[in-house]
Structures are given as structure tokens and as C-alpha cells.
Image: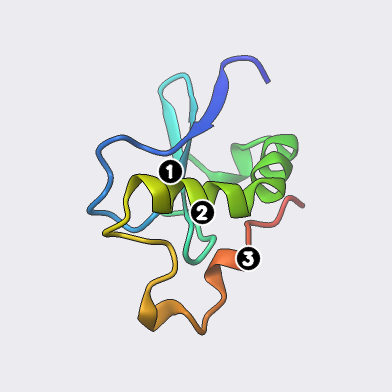
Amino acid sequence: MEGQNSREEEKESREPPHVSILRGTDKWRINLRTAAFMDQRPRPSDIPDELLAIIEQNWQWLCEQWDLKYPDNPVAMAEDADDGGEDDPPDAE
């Protein structure tokens, strides 16, 4: 999967916690609270299943890293604590 990577955005502390996947000029963002894609374009179906599987396998770590970087905007907010979003990574189907 040359040319692709996954990282947390540096300047995104005011947005919902998310992980970004970059490929060339394309960027997908996945909400770490809800596991939903935050943008309609580019199409989420264009992300290789192998990459989604890697994100799913590292979901807890990604959430922990966000919380360390943005302690004022943690993944598990008090009102979101019951929805279990942190435990539900995107499907790698």
C-alpha cells in the first residue's frame, strides 16, 4: 500500500476525534467516537480492505493516541460514554 498512510491530524483538536487516511491528494477521515466516515468524498469504498483492517486492529491505540494529544477533546466524552463508539472500529468488509 505504497503512498498511503494513516495519522491523526495536527490541527484538528476542535473537530470530533478522528483518524485521517491520506493517499495522494485524497483524504478520508474516520470519526473515533462513532467509527463513521466524516466525508462523502472521496468514496470510503475506495480505501483498500487491508488498510481498514489495520485501522480496526489498532482502533484502541488510535483512540489512546488522540486522547494523549488532545486531552481537552477526548474520544470518550461524558455524553458519549454509553454509545460505545470507541469500541466500534469501521468494518473491514
Q: Position of residue 29 (x, y in %)?
A: 44, 45
Q: For label 3, count other residues whose C-alpha is less than 10 Å away and answer few (under 14), some (14-19) or many (20+).
A: some
Farthest top residue in view: 2
**Horizontal side of residue 66 vs 45, given as left or right:** left
Indicate the secondary structure of the residue bearing disc 2.
Answer: helix
Q: Nearer the viewer, mark 3 or mark 1?
A: 3
Residue at mark 2 to residue at mark 3: CA–CA distance:
11 Å
The N terminus lies in which quarter of the figure?
top right
In this rendered view, identify the residue nearer to me: 82 or 29. 82
Q: Identify residue type, mark 3.
A: Asp
Q: Using the rendered image of the protein, determine whether residue 40 is visible from the camera's viewpoint.
A: no
Residue at the image point whose x is 32% and y is 55% from the top: 71
Q: Identify residue type, mark 1.
A: Arg
Q: Which residue is mark 2?
A: 63
Q: Residue 5 got which mark?
A: none
Indicate the secondary structure of the residue bearing disc 3.
Answer: loop
Of callouts 3 and 1, which one flags the residue occurring earlier in the amino acid sequence?
1
In this rendered view, identify the residue nearer to me: 72 or 23. 72
Q: Identify residue type, mark 2.
A: Cys
Q: Using the rendered image of the protein, determine whether residue 67 is visible from the camera's viewpoint.
A: yes
Residue at mark 2 to residue at mark 1: CA–CA distance:
23 Å
Q: Nearer the viewer, mark 2 or mark 3?
A: 2
Q: Which residue is mark 1?
A: 41
In this rendered view, identify the residue nearer to me: 63 or 39. 63
Quick check: marks 3 and 1 in contact, CB under 8 Å?
no
Q: Position of residue 42 (x, y in %)?
A: 46, 39
Residue at mark 3 to residue at mark 1: CA–CA distance:
22 Å
Vertical arrangement, residue 80 with respect to residue 27, above or below: below
Vertical arrangement, residue 13 with respect to residue 7, above or below: below
